[in-house]
Image (cartoon, grey):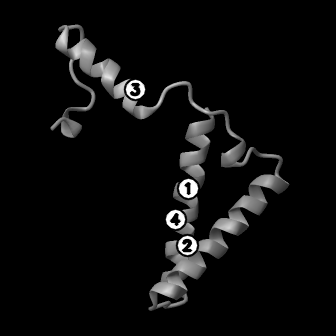
Amino acid sequence: MGNKHFVSELNLSTHLAEERIRNKAIQTKEGANQEHRKTGEEIRELIARGGGTLPEDQPTPTKSIQQIQREAQKRLESGQQPSLFEELEP
């Protein structure tokens, strides 16, 4: 469940920053970066104030994406399931 919240927060942060950049008519890369940073800080403060868990405090996954991909590839090669990572295969 933690990862879903992190992705949701990341999407919110990105969407809000893009809206602010558009509304403030920010034209420079530096200005856009500054607005993204400011938005991210405000969302982090909101999460902390609301008693939420910050991303760095989320539990570490037991397996990396690469490990999961290797396991899926082995299952695919043994004929046990269709590929979930077809577009990533070389």
Dot placed on the residue nearer the N-terminal end, 3 or 1: 1
Q: Are marks 4 and 1 in contact (CB under 8 Å)?
A: yes
Residue at the spot 72% in from the left edge and 59% down from the top edge: 44
Seen in the picture, residue 85 relative to 17 is either above or below; the reply is above
Q: Which mark is residue 14?
A: 4
| Quarter of the view holding residue 70 | top left
Give yes or no for contact between labels 4 and 3 (Cβ–Cβ under 8 Å).
Answer: no
Which residue is tagged 3? Answer: 67
Q: Residue at x 80, y 54 (%)?
A: 48
Dot 2, crowdedness within 10 Å: few (<14), some or many (≥20)?
Answer: many
Q: Dot 4, how many residues are within 10 Å of its Cα: few (below 14), some (14-19), or many (20+)?
A: some
Which mark lies nearer to you, 4 or 3? 3
> Are the residues tagged 4 and 2 within 8 Å (C-beta)?
yes
Which residue is under mark 1?
Answer: 10
Q: Earlier in the sequence, mark 2 or mark 3?
A: 2
Q: Earlier in the sequence, mark 4 or mark 3?
A: 4
Q: Position of residue 85 (x, y in %)?
A: 26, 32
Q: According to the image, label 2 marks what residue?
A: 17
Q: Which kind of residue does numbered mark 3 sit on?
A: Gln
In the rendered image, residue 79, in percent from the top left (x then y), is placed at 17, 8
Q: CA distance from mark 2 to mark 3?
A: 33 Å
Residue type of the residue flagged with mark 4 = Thr
